[in-house]
Amino acid sequence: MPSKPRNRLGEVYGQLTVVRGSERRSSSGNAYWWCRCSCGQEREVPSDKLSHNLSRRKPTITACIDCSRELQIEAVCAKNDREERQRRLAAEQARAGLQGSVPERWLKLPFTDAQARERGEVLFFRGTRCLRGHLAPYRINGGCLACAGQTPSAD
């Protein structure tokens, strides 16, 4: 017979608050608890998934299913924003040394394809060479203009 689980009623784990126990047990004998999310939805969670330990390797549950999806989307968006800032900074540094060696209109183009889309433009210039060694602007849907034969390379 499994041991009696620790009373977790009223404890808060992320956005979940334990509201009542469940009769259910996992195959390893862990008790389940009904938890209410801050959005009002309830979720049944095994006790081994409830933890305040942030450095543990086992996954924890800290929100209902809908809120968990929102948190995942926010994390992906934050990662993408961070990577876009790094790309823009790298392009800015690459273009700083090209003053005078490339046409001035190229230096006025956006740094990345995402920035070009934000501005509603079609071209961008990173200041780096393409795979074939050309130093030229790119189209946002991909491709060096020198490779396409539309613009000469600034070699």
Image: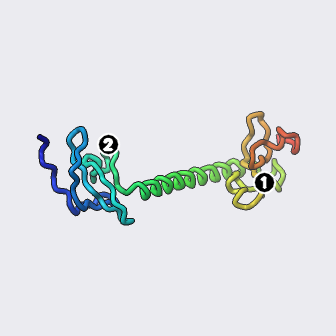
Residue 20 in the image, given as x and y percentages of width and height: 22, 59
Q: Is residue 61 left or right of residue 48?
A: right
Residue highlighted by disc 1: 122
The relative height of residue 120 versus residue 30 in the rendered view (above or below) is below
- Number of labels in the image equals 2
* Residue at the farthest top position: 132
Q: Is residue 40 above or below residue 75?
A: below
> Which residue occupies 77% across, 57% down?
121
Q: Nearer the viewer, residue 99 or 46?
A: 46
Residue 123, percent from left and from top = 78, 52
What is the C-alpha distance between the residues marked 1 and 2? 46 Å
Q: Which residue is painted at 72% across and 48% down in the image?
A: 126
In terms of image quadrants, where is residue 43?
bottom left
Q: Secondary structure at mark 2?
A: loop
Q: For the residues carrying marks 1 and 2, which lies nearer the camera in this image?
A: 2
Which residue corresponds to the image point at 12% horizontal and 44% vertical from the top-left?
3
Measured along the vertical axis of the image, is residue 75 above or below residue 10? Answer: above
Q: How is the image coloured?
A: rainbow
129 versus 107 height, above or below: above
- Residue corresponding to mark 2: 58
- Considering the image in quadrants, where does the N terminus appear? top left
Give x and y (percent) for residue 139. 78, 48
**The C terminus is located in which quarter?**
top right
- The 10 Å Cα crowd at callout 1, few under 14, some 14 to 19, many 20 or more, is some
> What label does residue 41 carry, if any?
none
Residue type, label 2 = Lys
Of pointers 1 and 2, the one earlier in the residue sequence: 2
